[in-house]
Structures are given as C-alpha cells and as structure tokens.
Amino acid sequence: MDSIDSIIQTPLLITAGASLVLFILLLVAKIRKTAKISFIYFPVIGIIFVGSLYTYFDPKLFYIVVILILSLLLFIAYATVLAISDPDKVSAKKQKKEEVNLDSDVVTKQYLEKQEAHYNKLLETNRELVEKASQYFKEEDSLAQYLEYFNNLITEKTNADGCAILVYDEFDNILSVKSVKGSFPPPYKLPEDLPHKAIRVETNFRYSNFSLEGNPFGDIFSAGLPVNIKDSIKDHRIFQNGPEEFLRCGPYMFIPVKQAGEATQLICLARKPDSDPFTEEEFEEACNIAGSFAVSLTPLSSFIAYAEHAELTKEGEIATKFQKTLLPEKVPAINKLSIGKYEVATENVCGDYYDIIASRRDRISFIMADVAGKGMNSLVVMIMIRAMLRLLANTNNSMATVLEWVNKAICSEKNSMDHFASVSLINYNSIENTAQISTSGTNPVLLYSSATGSISKVSTDCEPIGVEKNTEFKDININLNAGDILVTCTDGLLECLNESGVQYSLDNLSKVIKTCSNLNGKEIAGKVKDNIKKFCGNTQQYDDQSLLVIKIQG
C-alpha cells in the first residue's frame, strides 16, 4: 500500500489539472450555449478536482475511493431522475418553454413594431408641420397665421373644445396670448371690473398678458413641464370665476413648447366642464405634436428674424442717407460766435438731428434732437420735428413755448410708431449777448464760465416730447460773456462705451471742455472727438453721437 501511495502523487496532479480544464471548457460551452450542458457535471468535476489536490498533500488510497464514491452517487441520482421521468411531461414542459420563448419573441416583435409606427408617425407629423411652416415664409404675418393653423390642428387631434397659444416675450418677461380657438374658459382670476359677459371675457383674454407667476399660465410655463388637469375643481391652480356656464372650467392640458432647451410658447387645451377628461393617450399625443411644433418653429423663427433684420437694414440704409440731407452742409459764420460740431451716425439707427437757424441777430437758434426708434420710424418723426422747428424759429415765442407747440403736434399723431424725442433748444441773442434755453428729455446743455473757469449743467431733465400733450417746458435765461461756452449733445455721446463697458459720461465731456476752453469752437469739438476715440478704442457703439459747441467770442 505504501508503494502505491508513494507513486500516486504525479497522476493526482494530472487529474486535478485535467478536471480544471474540463470544468472551464464546459462552463464556456454553457455560457455560449453551444451545447446543452447538465448542471450535474460541475459538482462532479469539482469533487474530483478538490479531492485530487487534497490527496496529493495527504496521499492515502482512502481519499481516492471516497472521491469515486461521491462522484458515482451524484451520477446515480442524476440517472435515476432521468430513468423515472414521465416522457410526456418532459415533452409538455419542453413545448411550454418553447411557447413561452415564442410568445416572448412575439411580444418583442409587437413592441418593436409599435415603436416603429410611433416614430414613423412623429416623423410624418414633423415633416407635415415643417412643410406647412415653410408655406408661410412669404406671408405678411407668417407667425400669426402659422399659430392659427397649428391651433386648429392640435385642437382636432386631441378632440379639445378650445385651445389658446401663448408666446413668451423675453424683453418684457411676460406671456402674451397670440391665438385662441373655440371654447376656452379662463382658468385665471378675471379683473374685478370686467363684466361677466361672454364677448367681454373672450376679448379681454385675447389681448391679455400674463406674468410668469401668480397664474396657471405663468406657473406652468416657468416649471417647464406639461400638465394634464383632469379635475379643475380640485386643482388649486385653476380659478373658478363664477356660476355662468361659459366661465365653468373643465379639463385642461398645458404643454410648454421648448426650443434649444428653453420654453418659448405655451399650448393650452380645454374641454367643457361636463366632458370626459383628456386620457393619458391624448396627453401623450398632444405632447408629441407640441414637440413637432417646436421643430417646425425653428426654421420659421429663423426666417422671420432674418427677414426683419434685412428689412431693418434696408430701411436703416435709406433713413441714414436721408438723415444726412437734413443736417447743415456746413456751419454758418455768425458774428461773435465760434461754432464747432461733431457727429457720428451709427449704421441703420438714424436718431440724431441738429440744426443752426440764423433768422435774425436776436434770434439765432441751435437745435439738438435725439429721436426714439430706428430707421424710417425715427426719420419720419425727425422730418416732422425739423419742419415745425424751422417754421417756429423766426417767431417771437419763447423756446419753451416752441417746444410745447411741437409737443402737442407730435402727440396728436395717432399711430403705433414711437414718436418720442429729446430736444434741446438754444436761442442766442447777439445784440444783448444772452441765451434762452429750453429742453425736453435728456439732452443736456452745459455752460462754461470764463470768469470762474467752472462748467455746469444749466438744463433740467424732463419728459421727452411726444409723451403727454399738456407737458409744460421751462425757459432758462442766461447772460453770456466773452469766452463763455455753451455745449449740447445727445445721450449717444455720453453713453458710448469702452472695452470695459464703462460709459463716457458727462464728467469726461466737462473735463475736455474745461481743458480746451482757450480754443475755438471747432477745435474744442475736435478735441472731444479725439478724446472719445481714445476712450472707446475699437468698441462697437449702438447709438448716434452728436455734439454742438458754441463759444462766445465778443
């Protein structure tokens, strides 16, 4: 026995190694499913592997016998199960398993087909809306017409009784109602003084704006998540305005529309109070259509922005060309005065106008105007102001009275364009060496006193012309001496920016005037121009800059 035990160690190592390799190969085959491997093989091989290693370190024939007995018992148990199994049950179990696999395959196939149909429908909706949006490119009010079309589409697709589309105004930070269709009971609190009549409520809603909080539109839009309100009575966000039938609130859906990750519109769908609420399928359908709507809006919005920019550029070029014809070709030579000017017209803005009208020795008028708006809008107002001031300049009325007459005429214009303007009027009387000043808006008038070497602002800020027809303006009368300097300019000059975003300001202008007070008017204007160029560098400016310098020589 000892002789056998002494030579059995090498075969034991071979047996352990072979069993390990066999275990790995069977495991790989089972994982890759290249053959049907019974689980029983793995514990048997494990026993042989462990037993061989144990016998190697404690070489006794008893251990080998135990290994063989355990392995055989496992195989006998496995063979017994196979021998006594009912073939019909085994076959039925196998068939059931195959049916389950088949059903699973069918379910997977049906799911994939359903997903394919869903995305094909989305693609078709996207294509339809993008094509429709492109048809409105040539229309006068393309966005409004497209919103009307989409309103009809989503109302029909979701079986809603009414729909409202609100658009976010980034400048004013509000939601504006842009399209309303069908029956849409207001879910917000109506104004106290609004009569509860259907036509009045509907009209009020069509022209309403809403803040981004304190009302269902703003709250849901700000949250950025779609909401399906099935019972508006129980929902705290919905306000019940009264017992009238047209005011009773029913089910609602609110769906924010996002472009580039930011909410830009809000789609609001409603049903009558006694109608069934929107189902989850209808809610999902509405969200999908809203997503397609966002896709279609991108090219339309880009085109509208481009068209508006092109139109403004074209208008601006025309307006800038005409603006130059309204300005004096050259500064007139006036006894006792040295006059300097400086103007820079910003492309497509056309907001500044200045004039020098020498009617008579006691009536030499200097005008500096800054008209609100851009392009043709500001040009039209500029022409109106210029015409009226040229007619009134030779009258004996004070500068404040002249401004008041111009203001009343501008305020009488009943149109939608901005017609506001800041105007400074300076009337110089060369006989008495005095000046009468009146201003509207923000255009300043500065006075440098040669006697004290100081500079001060003599004008006062007040409402621009075009705001209120009954505005009263003030006359400021001053006596002048040789060496005194009057300066007026537009806010575009004072507000021009340097690379750090700092404005030029009235202080910088005043310093240049004081430093250069010994120069003539033209030279002073040139020094201001150089100082502004040095201050601003290459920073782009966005408003016209105009300056008038009037130096008293005698």
Image (spheres, rainbow, N blue to C red):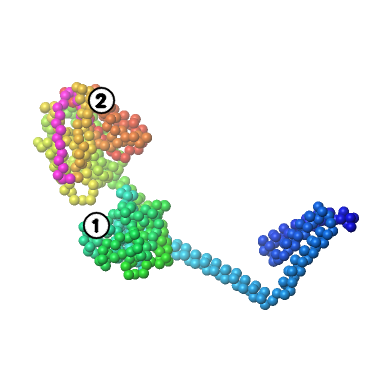
Q: Residue at x 21, y 61 (%)?
A: 195
Quadrant housing the N terminus = bottom right
Relative to 227, 48 lies left or right: right
- Residue 130 position in % (x across, y down): 40, 59
Position of residue 341 in the picture relative to residue 134 (left or right): left
38 vs 288, left or right, is right
Dominant SS in magenta: loop
The residue drawn where x is 12% and y is 36% is 398
Above or below for 363 versus 52: above
Counting residues from the start of the chain, the first of labels 1 and 2 encountered is 1
Residue 496 percent coordinates (x, y): 31, 36
In the rendered image, residue 302, in percent from the top left (x then y), is placed at 37, 52
**Residue located 23% across and 38% down the image:** 442
Badge 1: residue crowd in 10 Å (few <14, some 14–19, many ≥20): few
Camera-nearest residue between 386 and 317: 386
Query: Residue 138 at what x, y percent from top left?
Result: 33, 57
* Distance from Cα at disc 1 to Cα at disc 2: 58 Å
Whether residue 178 is in magenta: the answer is: no
Q: Nearer the viewer, residue 467 or 101?
A: 101
Q: What residue is drawn where x is 77% and y is 59%?
A: 48
The residue to which callout 2 is attached is: 514
Which numbered disc covers residue 191?
1
Magenta region, residue range: 468-487
Q: Residue furthest bottom?
A: 88
